[in-house]
Amino acid sequence: MHKSSIRPRAVVLGVLGGTALCLATPYNNMYLAATPLGGGHFPLAPFILLVCLTVLVAAVATLTRTRPLLSGTELLVSWMLSVVVSGIAYTGLMRTFLINITAVDHFASAGNRWSETLAPLIPRAWTVSDPQAVELLYNGLPGGRGLSWIEILGRIPWNAWAWPMASWGVFLFLCYLVMICLVNLFSRQWVVNERMNFPLLRLPYIMEESVQEGRVGSFFTDRFLLLGLLVPLVLHACNGLSVYLPSFPEIPTVILAGPYFAKTGLFSGFTKLKIYLIPAYIGFAFLTSRQISLSFWLFFLLGGLLSGALSMMGYQVPQSALGVTFGPTLTMVEETQMIGAYVVFFLFIVWLARHHLREVARSAFSLTPIPAGEAEWFSTRWSFWGLVLGGGGLTAWCAWFGMPVLLSMLLLGAFFAITLVASRVICQGGIAYFTLTAAPTDGLLGFCGSGFFTSAGLVMGVVMQKILFLDLRESLMPSLVHAAKVGEPVSRRRLYFAGMCLALVLGVAASFVAVLALCHKVGVRDLQADWEISSVLRVYEDAQRLLDAPSTPNPWIISFACIGAVSMLGLILCFQRFYWWPLHPVGFLTMYSSSMRILWFSFLVGWTCNQLTLRYGGIELFKKVRLFFIGLILGDFLMGGVFAVVGLWLGQSYQVLPS
């Protein structure tokens, strides 16, 4: 592979862009409720910046007849550095973080008895001990709206926040260390050995290839691309105008299909079915391999049919059979199949990488120098020992605050195993918007009961889970996997990796300051934070239910988890042994994900178009038509950027993409 060098200017540009994004995201997302700047795994703002830089660099090079200020690889590196930190300021960390560590004190009442039941179990170093500081967070500073941001920063009681930030800072540092080491261990296997497809990177790669080859103008003026661009342009222009001018006609993008299905019988599982028309996600689906895109929409429909079939056979298990769970969207017992499926797929990932991992283990104890391989930021020896030290540090951190060592090891193992599997699904499947079905703690609770956790361990575990491992819509690890792929041709990897570490440090600091300043200016109560507050309160309410009425191993969850494990094992065996097998195992993992309720139709359309194009037009037509679907993605995100700016100007925004 041809290696490309990068200059410090590319790294500095990416770090500054990511930091600026972290500063702007809370105000845009939480106060204006505008189109998320850094939402999902293909965030809006970094991509808009990439497009603008690409056009600017190409235009300057053409006008001055000189080399481009940034090469295509450098543009990709700058983009990726801002992508890596894009989620930290919102769902990736800060969206519920401050509420999470203050909710027990602020929302405690005589009715819920949290002061007596939950507060003693939460380490005081995790929370803000000053009641006045907590009140300022939720109500804002007196006259805060009239104060400048500099004045707001000067009046924040930083002393009250110093200790919890230090405690959680250690947790974040160790978690990010483990994630980086895990990705570095598996990057060569996924990127080089398996040649995994990365649909979310296709558009940036194609765009920057045009920079390298000096054909940016012909790329952006291609008739297929312009035709695809026109679709979201017209769609969002009409719907955006209807937001500001209610008399203007709106083009529906959500079709309620549920009313067309009977509430009983085989198709009763589709009574809440919706069809979302999202051009960008159709474009990503077209770029995804046909086997995977087929599996996504087909397994989603099979999940609905399974619910109807179980109902017809009299096996409609009530929701109460789930007991107390922490899954963000878990409502049916059959959805707990994903617990077993995730475990088996994780073992499948490890089995595929068995030869590579054997070499890693051998190199970890070797004394000879071992250089980093392709797509690796540093040697696997350092990855191995970094993983050991990071995991050991997290275990010690949990034990220091009172969690049993065995529980902390199992819980942390479940956290990172599920996140690794989810990262594989997101990156290989091209899913820009992904959510878990069951939470990591649901598996341990279902198999072991709440008594295994201990009271303090239970509360601490669900708090840690909520902070970093429950909502994966903007999780860090998938972005790290994408960063490994982007770094494959980079020769100066130490510079690239140093920039990534610096971006993470500055991103966390900027996000914390931005959210804290916004809350003190207007108060959490006046932010668009209904979901944030309710989701945190639900976690604590469910934890208290388990404290009041401890659970035993749940036979329903165990049964369906075992069914899911067997089903996944069967899918893996068929996938590995039969070349004609049409389904990919990752499709089963998204069967009940709430993200697939939005994306299933996009994958159906993308798969159908991909199939027809290759069957009747061959590879030549595919290369041309591909630009139409790239135009769909480009147009959707460009319109998202336009309305993000309009929203900042008018104070009211039209959301182009789902949040």
Image (cartoon, rainbow, N blue to C red):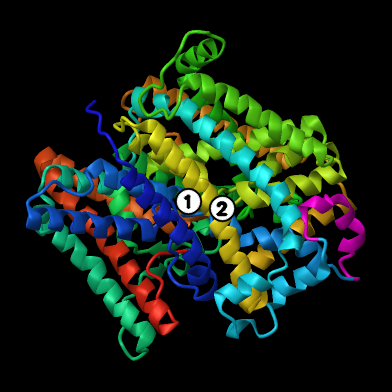
The residue identified by callout 1 is: 85
Q: Residue at x 48, y 40 (%)?
A: 423
Q: Residue 641: where, in percent of width, then height?
A: 33, 67
Circle 1 SS class: helix
Q: Are marks 2 and 1 in contact (CB under 8 Å)?
A: yes
| Residue 409 visible within the image | yes
Disc 1 marks a residue whose amino acid type is Val
Question: Taking 341 as reference, is 160 left or right?
Answer: right
Q: Nearer the viewer, residue 356 or 512?
A: 512
Give, as a single range, the part of the protein colored magenta: 110-128
Looking at this view, name the residue that lies furthest to the top. Answer: 367
In the rendered view, would you say 104 is above or below 547?
A: below
Circle 2 SS class: helix
Q: Quadrant of residue 456?
A: top right
Looking at this view, name the residue that lies furthest to the bottom. Answer: 247
Which numbered marker is on residue 508? 2
Disc 2 marks a residue whose amino acid type is Val
Asked whether residue 385 is drawn in magenta, I would say no
